[in-house]
Amino acid sequence: MLVAIPNLLTPQQVAYARQKLDAANWTDGAATAGVMAKKVKRNRQIDQNDRVGGEIGQMILKALSSNVTFLSAAQPLKVLPPKFNRYEGGEHYGAHIDNAIMDIPGSGGCACARTSVLDTYGHKAIKLPAGHAILYTATSLHEVTPVTRGIRTSSFFWIQSLIRDDARRSMLYDLSEVIGSLTATHPDHPSLSGFVGHYHKLLQHWIEL
């Protein structure tokens, strides 16, 4: 499932984040890469304990917590603290699969994601406006192509979902979109309560804690 989340951050939040991140201490991103990823990773990142990263990360987490699209599509159980990376002057991150287990700093815990060597969606080129987000499954092969103009500054993070299977998450998301559309256009439709009931039955059946 590939879901765009428009306007996660407001223009004012984006401007503030840019000001703070431009002054942050950026280090070689390969330091946090796995053995295979080091071969294809050419970027810079902020240390996960950096105060600037923590502040902007909390801003992002707060925005996510009230975003209906994110909550419906991700069905989050755990959201790891956001990290930040930066690309310029031809820097890139070649095709890779993310690590299967990600530590949660300061919590003594971790979030797990299953990995795959196959791209679920085929080839999709994605370039979104500042403040927008893209949600995709950790099973996908993905890359950042060389940045030849300007600077690409992004936040990235991992989610452990209540619904482990991506296909089931996708079906629940599609059903929730149908319910939302029907609610907006025909709030008194007799089938609406049936759709809502079916959605929650599936949710209860598929949730893994």
Image (tube, grey):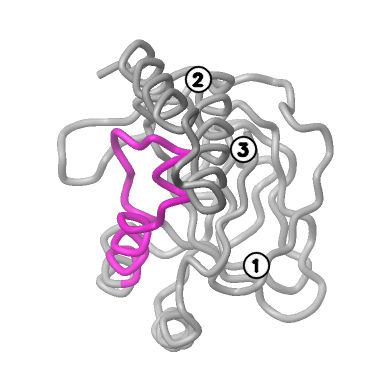
* Residue at (84% x, 39% y) in the render: 123
Residue that sits furthest to the left in the current view: 107
- Tag 1 residue: 87
Q: Nearer the viewer, mark 1 or mark 3?
A: 1
The kind of secondary structure element at disc 1 is strand
Amino acid type at circle 3 is Ala
State which region is magenta: 56-82
Q: Nearer the viewer, mark 1 or mark 2?
A: 2
Q: Nearer the viewer, mark 2 or mark 3?
A: 2
Q: Is residue 151 magenta?
A: no
Reading the chain from its start, which is encountered first: label 1 or label 2? Answer: 1
Q: From mark 1 to mark 2, how far is it between C-alphas?
A: 27 Å
- Tag 2 residue: 114
Amino acid type at circle 2 is Arg
Q: From mark 1 to mark 3, how far is it between C-alphas?
A: 16 Å
Q: Left or right? Give the position of 83 relative to 153.
A: left
Residue 32 appears at what percent x and percent y?
A: 46, 46
> Magenta part mainly helix, strand or loop?
helix
